Each structure stands twice: as C-alpha cells, then as structure tokens.
Amino acid sequence: MMQRRPLVDCAVTETLAAVALESVSQMYGKGPSAVRALEEVTIACPAGGFTAVMGPSGSDKTTLLQCAAGLDRPTAGTVRIGETELGRLS
C-alpha cells in the first residue's frame, strides 16, 4: 500500500486567518476498510491572499476544500472561518 504524505503542513499564523484548519483529519468508513483522506492537516489562508491547492489526482484536494468550506465535517480537528468555528454551528 502506498504511504500518503500530508497534503499540506503549514503553521497557523498569529494573525486572524480568513480560513484556518487545525489538525483536521477525515476518515471514510470503519474498521480495516476505512480510508484516511486527511491526516492532521493544519493550514491558514490569510484574508486578501491567494491560495492554490495543487496535487495529483486522488490526493484529497476536494476533501480538504469541502472541509474548509463547511460542506463536510471533519472526523477530527477544527475549521474556522474568521473567528467562527464551524463545528459549533448546526
């Protein structure tokens, strides 16, 4: 089985980020057939900046963006838009 590297591993800056993911993990399924899509991804995208998410097909770019946009809840970790933590919203 191919070993995956983290999609991105950036330190969250002290300034308020427009979007911030902290130690976000995403798993699909349970047991031995579970698939780990994201593993403890931490990234901060500053307001007014431009961020490109690049990688080969199947590297979980879409999963990262769906978690960042609040379309999918991560299995672990926190996602913030500004000062709002998405996991606390209904």
Image: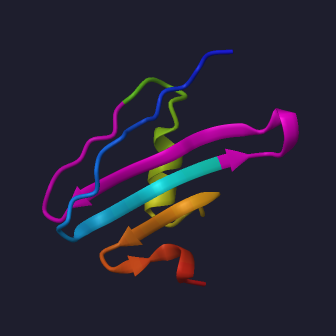
Residue drawn at x 37%, y 39% is: 8
Residue 58 in the image: state x and y as whole percent: 55, 28
Q: Is residue 36 magenta?
A: yes
- In the picture, measured across the screen, residue 53 lies left or right of residue 66, that is left
Q: Quadrant of residue 17?
A: bottom left
> Does 62 sit above or below residue 24?
above
* Magenta highlight range: 27-54
Task: Judge by depth and name the residue closer to the eye, 74 or 58.
Answer: 74
> Does 55 sit above or below residue 76?
above
> Does 8 sit above or below residue 75?
above
Q: How is the image coloured?
A: rainbow
Residue drawn at x 50%, y 30% is: 59
Quarter in which the N terminus is drawn: top right
Q: Quadrant of residue 29?
A: top right
Task: Judge by depth and name the residue closer to the eye, 3 or 28.
Answer: 3
Q: How many marks?
A: 0
Q: Residue furthest right?
A: 31
Residue 90 in the image: state x and y as whole percent: 60, 84
Residue drawn at x 44%, y 23% is: 56
Q: Quadrant of residue 18?
A: bottom left
Residue 40 in the image: state x and y as whole percent: 51, 47
Q: Is residue 51 magenta?
A: yes
Residue drawn at x 51%, y 54% is: 24
Q: Residue furthest left?
A: 48
